[in-house]
Amino acid sequence: MPKKRSPFSVIRFAREALAFLRKQSALWPVTILLIAIPSFVMTVAGRLTEDGSPLLKTGVPDFLELNDPQGYSLVIAIVLLTLLTVWGAASIMVVGRRMIGNRAGRARTSASSVMKESAPLVFPIFFTSIIQLAHALLWFIPAFAAAFGAYMIGIAMHWSLNSTFQGNLYFVVFPLVVFIAAIPGIIYLLRTSFYSIVLVSEDLKFTQALRRSKEVVNRRLWTTIRCLAGLIILFLVPPTILGWLLEPFTQTSVPALLVIDFGMNVINALCTAPLILSSVLLYGALRDAPKAVRL
């Protein structure tokens, strides 16, 4: 009897997501308007805090310091821009949920209809992410305790980082201990990583979406880790490497910085769209695969 193929193939997810994206013309303007442009604005805002950035030689920092010395407007702007990127991701998931069998509603034929349908999902996704983070902080308590304990031990014993042995304890042993202590929190974040897809595809809200994601992932945690890692390597590592290579050129002039940052944010957004669609496919495979299927 031929061996049954596993439904968890990173390459298959990526190919299906790219093929689906090519047919969904409405997602291209959504990706640029709601992900690329807000990300570009946040990147430029971040450049204002970097030492040596060409933007520091313009009048923008002085203008902001004069009109908003506390930085409140910048924080509000970052939150609003983040909500726009959440809206963009929700729009992609609204269309992408058709790939895993949810065909409710009429087919989306324009960017405006996609954005209109996904708009009510923005705040549920945003607030659920806050709930997820709050729960994760509880799981990270052992890591916080390990880090604090390492700090107090170092003070009590008057350790010097100039000592090879004591320096190795600080920079090798203690980070390793903190990482091990953080594993429960990391596992929690992985188990609940599909909450936004659940919100979009299964009409569950807040903690219900977190619990549903845990139920689906718990059966195949290592499969989820492998597939998510593979998708991240496929879609995010190449643009990240390209960004590192182009980074020195951003220090030459303001026009070069703006052109490179805008181009990289467009590239990152165009890579993020198939990553989101691939994650939708992965969730559908995890949810629907028989328990007998093993890797």
Image (tube, grey):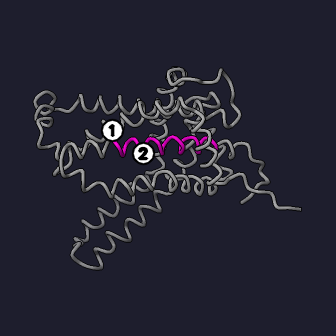
Work out whether mark 1 precedes mark 2 in sequence or the reverse, and give the earlier one. Answer: 1
**Front residue (pair 96, 72):** 96
Report which residue position mark 2 lands on: 268
Where residue 259 is drawn, which disc sits there? Answer: none
Which residue is at 60% across, 35% downward? 23
Residue 273 is a magenta residue: yes
C-alpha gap between disc 1 and disc 2: 10 Å
- Image position of 4 with respect to 282: above or below: below
Which residue is at 54% across, 23% downward? 110
**Front residue (pair 170, 34):** 34
Where residue 40 is drawn, which disc sits there? Answer: 1
Q: Quadrant of the N terminus?
A: bottom right
Q: Main secondary structure of the magenta part?
A: helix
Q: Quadrant of residue 4?
A: bottom right
Question: Mark 2, residues whose alpha carbon is within 10 Å: few (<14), some, or many (≥20)?
Answer: many
Point out the residue furthest to the bottom here.
164
In the picture, measured across the screen, residue 39 lies left or right of residue 119, that is left
- Amino acid at the residue labelled 1: Phe
Q: Position of residue 193 (x, y in %)?
A: 54, 44
